[in-house]
Image (tube, coloured by chain):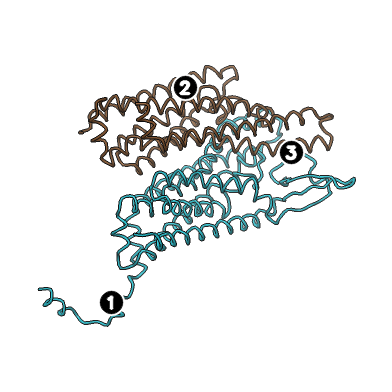
Chain colours: A cyan, B brown
């Protein structure tokens, strides 16, 4: 029967028939397969944004009235200060701790789910034998989910930076401080993207979703500690000086970050990073994180291509 | 059951034990450094001299270290809530509960034994870590204008940290049993625990004298232990009513 029905189809050349499935179809497939995660992430981030907006307006209002209060040592001003210290600061501090976990948690949930889940449950046998091919399937999903996460977290981090500014100035924190620097500018989105790439790569390597999630947490912590304790001090933005007056006086949010001091002959030397180097540092860090994410993505695709289906 | 629990959850338990060992070693190292730097800065006279200000600045870099450890310490129960979800959910999702629950020990005793063993391990580990961190943090109470009742300091001391850790584990196990699918259960446990912690911090903003530390600790540990007991009872009830 099939012998009769097959020629009934319109005869085409071999080339159009082999033409790959268009990329844009993958948008629908990616959405369809990961809609639970994508909707969940968007909903959580939307809730976080509303919270940041409401609490941020309150914190900015309270901090402005504190700054405009005269004279500063009056009882009324002390009351405003106590109020800020007891309400706005604890909220900001709690959010600061949670927000620093956001990149790695998003990476751990989204990364291994792309590949480890299909490998663990065996659905990769179906997914990887579709017309689009396993390599393009993987590239399309990694790119789309990675871009979605980077855009969403980039937007949330701008809101968070605004929300945290009063608490940061109140506590005289520097924008270069670990935990502050990471949540501002382009850095937060870059860390999220790197966490997602680590998760996807480890998922493909370990092939089991829960161990891959745990490994993602560990690996991300390792990279973050490396950046905090080793790399960040060595970005080529530091300045050496003998001018001790730069560092006298009380510490303020615009004080430089002193890396080290040493004595050569009879002169004291300081190596420091001024706050004005914030953006060069941001671009350096986001740059290497982006390179890391692309390299891990390429390694993931290589594993997909070379490990037996 | 001890052997079976270890065998089945050796991934989770060995991660907890490895994390515990790394944390103890790291905190001992950091704590000795912080106490040493603080002793030097505090002994410097006169306090206004340039050399003394340099020592104070140097000590301020230790604050990054202390604060980083604090973030990691407060994050640990959150991650535990997430990884506790598969303890029961994995058997439900994978269908292995049909085998596990029909053994001689009975499904209720099986569940209670697993929860008790893993719960005890994480609670004891948390208690040790929080005592170590309390010692590490002592200098910052002077330099950072914090008291033992400050939010995010209070929760790392006394019995509160161990109680939060136990609650995180019980919450994860309960939600895993309720939702029955590993990944959604992990995500929901994480969000629920974060929400619980955030609401607690927000609602405890009133100012207390430092003498109120132990009464506040007992109150917080008390309601967290009650919540844990309710969650364990809920888990057992769900297990008992689930069709085998």
Horizontal side, residue A294 vs residue B167: left or right = right
Q: Is residue A69 above or below residue A246?
A: above
Could you tell me which chain the residue with mark 3 belongs to? B
Horizontal side, residue A283 vs residue A302: left or right = right
Q: Position of residue A308 (x, y in %)?
A: 36, 60
At mark 2, the secondary structure is helix
Q: Nearer the viewer, residue B180 or A36?
A: B180
At mark 3, the secondary structure is helix
The answer to whether tags 1 and 2 share a subunit is no
Badge 1 is on which residue?
A17
Q: Is residue B133 above or below residue A211?
A: above
At mark 1, the secondary structure is helix
Instruction: Give the alpha-carbon distance from disc 1 to disc 3, as whole Å.
Output: 69 Å
For the residues carrying marks 3 and 2, which lies nearer the camera in this image?
Answer: 3
Q: Residues within 10 Å of mark 2 (few under 14, many from 20)?
A: many
The answer to whether tags 1 and 3 share a subunit is no
Instruction: Give the alpha-carbon distance from disc 1 to disc 2, as whole Å.
Output: 68 Å
Q: Nearer the viewer, residue B192 or A145?
A: A145
At 52% from the left edge and 20% from the top edge, which residue is drawn?
Answer: B216
Instruction: Give the alpha-carbon distance from disc 3 to disc 2, as whole Å.
Output: 37 Å
Q: Residues within 10 Å of mark 3 (few under 14, many from 20)?
A: some
Horizontal side, residue A59 vs residue B169: left or right = right
Could you tell me which chain the residue with mark 1 belongs to? A
In terms of sequence position, does the residue under pointer 3 or pointer 2 come before the other?
Answer: 3
Badge 2 is on which residue?
B221
Q: Position of residue A277 (x, y in %)?
A: 69, 54
Badge 3 is on which residue?
B58
Q: Residues within 10 Å of mark 1 (few under 14, many from 20)?
A: few
Q: Is residue A218 above or below residue B66?
A: below
Q: Position of residue A135 (x, y in %)?
A: 39, 65
Q: Position of residue B37 (x, y in %)?
A: 73, 32
């Amino acid at each position: 029967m099939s012998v009769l029905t097959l020629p009934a189809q319109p005869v085409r050349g071999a080339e159009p028939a082999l033409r790959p499935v268009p990329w844009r179809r993958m948008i629908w497939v990616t959405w369809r397969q990961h809609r639970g995660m994508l909707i969940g992430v968007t909903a959580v981030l939307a809730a976080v944004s509303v919270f940041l907006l409401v609490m941020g307006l309150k914190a900015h209002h309270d901090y402005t009235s504190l700054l405009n209060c005269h004279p500063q040592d009056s009882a009324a001003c002390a009351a405003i200060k106590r109020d800020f210290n007891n309400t706005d600061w604890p909220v900001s501090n709690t959010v600061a701790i949670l927000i620093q976990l956001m990149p790695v948690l998003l990476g751990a949930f989204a990364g291994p789910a792309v590949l480890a889940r299909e490998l663990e449950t065996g659905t990769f046998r179906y997914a990887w034998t579709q017309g689009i091919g396993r390599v393009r399937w993987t590239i399309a999903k990694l790119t789309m989910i990675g871009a979605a996460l980077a855009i969403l977290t980039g937007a949330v981090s701008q809101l968070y930076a605004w929300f945290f500014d009063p608490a940061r100035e109140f506590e005289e924190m520097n924008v270069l401080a670990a935990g502050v620097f990471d949540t501002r500018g382009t850095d937060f989105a870059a860390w999220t993207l790197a966490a997602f790439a680590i998760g996807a790569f480890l998922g493909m390597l370990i092939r089991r979703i829960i161990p891959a999630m745990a490994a993602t947490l560990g690996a991300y912590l390792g990279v973050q500690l490396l950046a905090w304790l080793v790399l960040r001090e060595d970005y080529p933005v530091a300045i050496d000086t003998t001018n001790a007056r730069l560092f006298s006086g009380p510490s303020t949010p615009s004080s430089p970050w002193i890396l080290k001091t040493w004595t050569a002959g009879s002169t004291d030397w300081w190596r420091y990073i001024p706050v004005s180097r914030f953006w060069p540092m941001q671009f350096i860090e986001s740059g290497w994180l982006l390179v890391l994410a692309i390299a891990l993505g390429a390694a993931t695709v290589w594993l997909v291509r070379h490990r037996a289906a | 059951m001890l052997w079976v629990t270890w065998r089945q959850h050796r991934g989770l338990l060995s991660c907890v034990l490895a994390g515990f060992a790394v944390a103890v070693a790291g905190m001992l190292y950091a704590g000795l450094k912080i106490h040493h730097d603080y002793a030097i800065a505090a002994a410097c006279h006169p306090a206004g001299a340039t050399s003394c200000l340099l020592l104070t600045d140097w000590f301020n870099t230790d604050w990054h270290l202390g604060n980083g450890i604090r973030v990691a310490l407060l994050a640990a129960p959150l991650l535990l809530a997430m990884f506790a979800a598969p303890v029961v959910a994995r058997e439900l999702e994978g269908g292995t509960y049909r085998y596990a629950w029909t053994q001689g020990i009975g499904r209720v005793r099986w569940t209670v034994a697993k929860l008790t063993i893993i719960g005890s391990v994480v609670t004891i580990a948390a208690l040790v870590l929080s005592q170590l961190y309390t010692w590490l943090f002592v200098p910052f109470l002077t330099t950072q204008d914090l008291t033992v009742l400050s939010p995010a300091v209070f929760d790392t001391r006394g019995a509160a940290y161990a109680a939060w850790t136990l609650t995180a584990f019980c919450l994860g196990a309960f939600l895993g049993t309720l939702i029955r699918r590993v990944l959604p259960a992990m995500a929901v446990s994480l969000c629920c625990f974060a929400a619980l912690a955030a609401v607690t911090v927000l609602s405890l903003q009133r100012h207390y004298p430092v003498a109120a530390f132990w009464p506040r600790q007992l109150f917080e540990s008390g309601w967290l232990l009650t919540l844990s007991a309710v969650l364990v009872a809920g888990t057992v009830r769900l297990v008992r009513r689930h069709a085998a």
